[in-house]
Amino acid sequence: MKKTILITMAVLGLALTTQAQLLPKTVTLAWDPIPPLQNTPDLTVRIYHETSLVVPKALWVMLAEVPATNNTATITLQPGQHFFVAKSYSAFWKLESDFSNVAQTPPAPSDLFNLTIRLGL
């Protein structure tokens, strides 16, 4: 069972939707749902954030940890460019997946419009 969980956790992909309307900006991250037979109650998705790709991912800040039954998370951010990755975590097995692909926002503009970015789907 450990190998199945690790394989599932390693294939997380992220999609990113952002609405640039008024400060601060709202970003919604989305990922593929984990299959029900592999989604145990202890499984969560950890979302990490950084404003620069120069910083090693191991040093990125964890913004949220959501149950794996969810496949989205909405985050409020200040203006600027933002980068995100996700990891699955099993509290029972004490295992964490590799980082997902990087999703990013463009530098947040100050004028009113809607912008959608989809990565990894």
Image (cartoon, grey):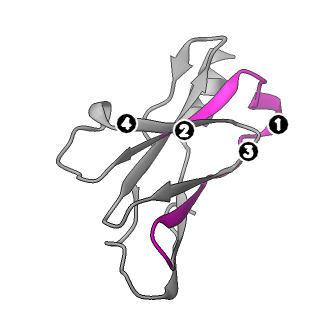
Name the kind of residue labelled 1 in the image. Answer: Pro
- The nearer-to-camera label among 3 and 1 is 3
User: What is the crowding at mark 2: few (fewer than 14 residues within 10 Å), some, or many (at least 20)?
Assistant: some
Q: Which residue is mark 4?
A: 61
Q: Secondary structure at mark 4?
A: strand
Looking at the image, residue 11 lies above or below residue 121: above
Identify the residue shown where x is 76% and y is 31%. 39
Identify the residue shown where x is 72% and y is 21%. 42
- Which quarter of the figure is the N terminus placed in? top right
Q: Is residue 110 a member of the stretch shown in magenta? A: no
Mark closer to the chain start, 3 or 2: 2
Front in this rendered view, residue 96 or 48: 48
- The image quadrant of residue 37 is top right
Looking at the image, residue 24 lies above or below residue 5: below
Front in this rendered view, residue 13 or 107: 107
User: What is the crowding at mark 1: few (fewer than 14 residues within 10 Å), some, or many (at least 20)?
Assistant: few
Q: Secondary structure at mark 3?
A: loop
Q: Which residue is mark 2?
A: 64
Q: CA distance from mark 1 to mark 2?
A: 22 Å
Q: Which residue is mark 1?
A: 36
The region drawn magenta spans: 22-47
Labelled disc at residue 102: none
Q: In this view, which residue lies farthest toward the right?
A: 36
Name the kind of residue labelled 2 in the image. Answer: Ala
Q: Which residue is mark 3?
A: 70
In the picture provided, is 67 more to the left or to the right than 45? right
- The nearer-to-camera label among 1 and 4 is 4
| Image spot of residue 119 (x, y percent) | 49, 65
